[in-house]
Amino acid sequence: MADEQKPIFVYEDENGTVQGYAFCIYQIMQGIPALFDRKVLYIDDLCVDASQRGKKIGEKLYQYMVDFAKANACDSVTLHVWNDNQGAFRFYERLGLEPLKTLMEQKL
């Protein structure tokens, strides 16, 4: 079932085999005090098959999403990354993303 508010992107090789994917969500932020109205493309999940990593598939998917977001009047692209996933953190920094905020937790 297609949902225009939740675009999905798939990277396939020349044989049609899925090598990576991204699940996204449009986030519309309106009427929030101290914030301008914004439209954001939030990347909920970006995954590349482990056997295909290092082949720039993640970069190609990400760049496609950036171009898609621009074409759809988004102000930015955002995502969450776990602090202990340093490989992903470095990957996203290399693509130009910057830390925005930190979620704190106390386990009970």
Image (tube, rainbow, N blue to C red):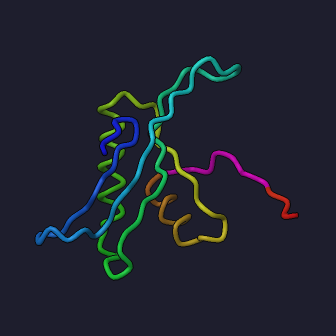
Which residue sits at x=46%, y=49%? 43
Residue lying furthest front: 1
Examine the residues drawn in magenta and state their main secondary structure.
Answer: loop
Vertical order, 97 against 54 (above or below): above
Magenta region includes residue 85? no
Q: Quadrant of residue 15?
A: bottom left
The quadrant of the picture occupied by the C terminus is: bottom right
Q: Identify which residue, 40 or 10, lies in the foreground.
A: 10
Residue at the right extreme of this rendering: 108
Classify residue 18 as left or right of residue 94. left
In depth, the one of 94 and 30 nearer the eye is 30
Q: Furthest-bottom residue in view? A: 51
Query: What is the x, y in percent for residue 16?
Result: 15, 67
Task: Name the residue: 62% across, 17% down.
Answer: 31
In the image, residue 87 above or below residue 64: below
Q: Is residue 69 above or below residue 61?
A: above
Give percent across and percent down for residue 99.
62, 51
Q: Position of residue 72 (x, y in %)?
A: 33, 30
Q: Which residues are magenta?
A: 97-104
Q: Indicate yes or no whether the magenta region holds residue 98.
A: yes
Q: Position of residue 30 (x, y in %)?
A: 57, 20
**Quadrant of res 105:** bottom right
The N terminus - image quarter: top left
Identify the residue at image location x=31%, y=77%: 52
Q: Is residue 40 above or below residue 61?
A: above
In this rendering, would 33 be left or right of 21? right
